Amino acid sequence: MLPEDIRVFGNGGVKERNSVLIEGEDGFILFDPPGEKTVAQLISESCRQLGKSVRIIVYTHHHVNHLLGASYFPEGIICSHETTMLQLKEKEIDLGVRLPNLLFSSSIEIRCCRGWLRLFHCPGHTVDSICGVYGDILLGGDTILENSPPFWGEGESTTYLRSLAELSSLNISLVIPGHGKICGRDRLSIYVDYIEKLTNSAWYILERGGEPDSCRLPLSEFYPNYLRVMVPEFHLANLQTLSREWIARTQRKETS
Ligand SMILES: [Zn+2]
């Protein structure tokens, strides 16, 4: 299903992340470093067999579980969106995290064996999130998860929807999500549907005087097929963020 110059490590586990290894001419590009040492060892072994090392590591955003694995590949330079660097400094994320040294603002293209990997800013899950496209494959990072609803606890719903609209306009047929199994492009419309329904329902309640805390809509109404481990906490965090977005919107209206 995947071309032979792309390998996915960690695919399928509910909380397991996916690291994607793409073969370049003089080394590998590692999209999202692994969180576990055992996965890092598998990736290293794969590189050794093919006689190339990791040349570029891509941070998809600043969440710590997506950063620490870079220490297993000291030979790779680290590429990220420019706001990832700002987030790391602002939030004083240290823990021995390696800082990015190849930054981009809108997008960047990296030459690979059989084409170009395009990385581009795709905010929503977080302000600094990026996605990648290689051929007709979308590398989703945490913007696209297969085993849970979209999660924007510290992001923003309208930004997320804008990014999903951009992703929907791309000519892609497969999605390698940040967590979960490889899926099809229908994941994008499922995500749009979830965010739109949740936003409309939450704002309907809030605009009629409901308390933000009363806005805990039943999960099954919105996501009946994805009741797995990560889902309830993401769903509640999304509702809390929607409450904050609504309060900020109301305050903007009052001051204008
Ligand atoms: Zn994340």
Image (cartoon, helix red, strand yellow):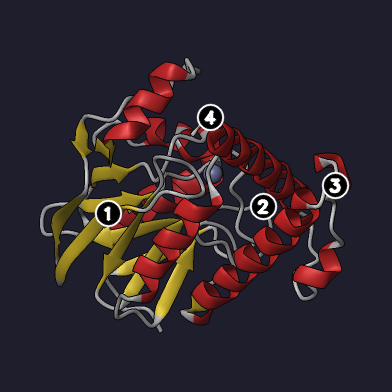
**Residue identified by numbered label 1:** 120
**Residue identified by numbered label 2:** 15
Q: Residues within 10 Å of mark 3 (few under 14, many from 20)?
A: few
Q: Nearer the viewer, mark 1 or mark 4?
A: 4
Res 12 seen here: no
Three-letter code, disc 1:
Phe
Against 196, is 99 above or below? above
Viewer-side residue, 12 vs 99: 99
Which residue appears at 32% of the width and 45% of the height?
58
Q: Nearer the viewer, mark 1 or mark 2?
A: 1
Report which quarter residue 212 is drawn in. top right
Q: Is the C-beta of the residue carrying label 2 under 8 Å from the nearest atom of ligand 1? A: no
User: In the drawing, does residue 155 fall left or right of residue 110?
Assistant: right
Kindly check if marks 1 and 4 are in contact, taking CB atoms under 8 A apart as contact.
no
Secondary structure under the numbered disc 2 in the rendered image: loop
Three-letter code, disc 3:
Gly
Which residue appears at 38% of the width and 63% of the height?
139
* Residue 28 drawn at (x, y percent): 24, 53
User: In the drawing, does residue 189 fall left or right of residue 140?
Assistant: right
Q: Nearer the viewer, mark 2 or mark 4?
A: 4
Counting residues from the N terminus, which is met first, the one under dot 2 or under dot 4? 2
Secondary structure under the numbered disc 4 in the rendered image: helix
* Residue 56 drawn at (x, y percent): 23, 44
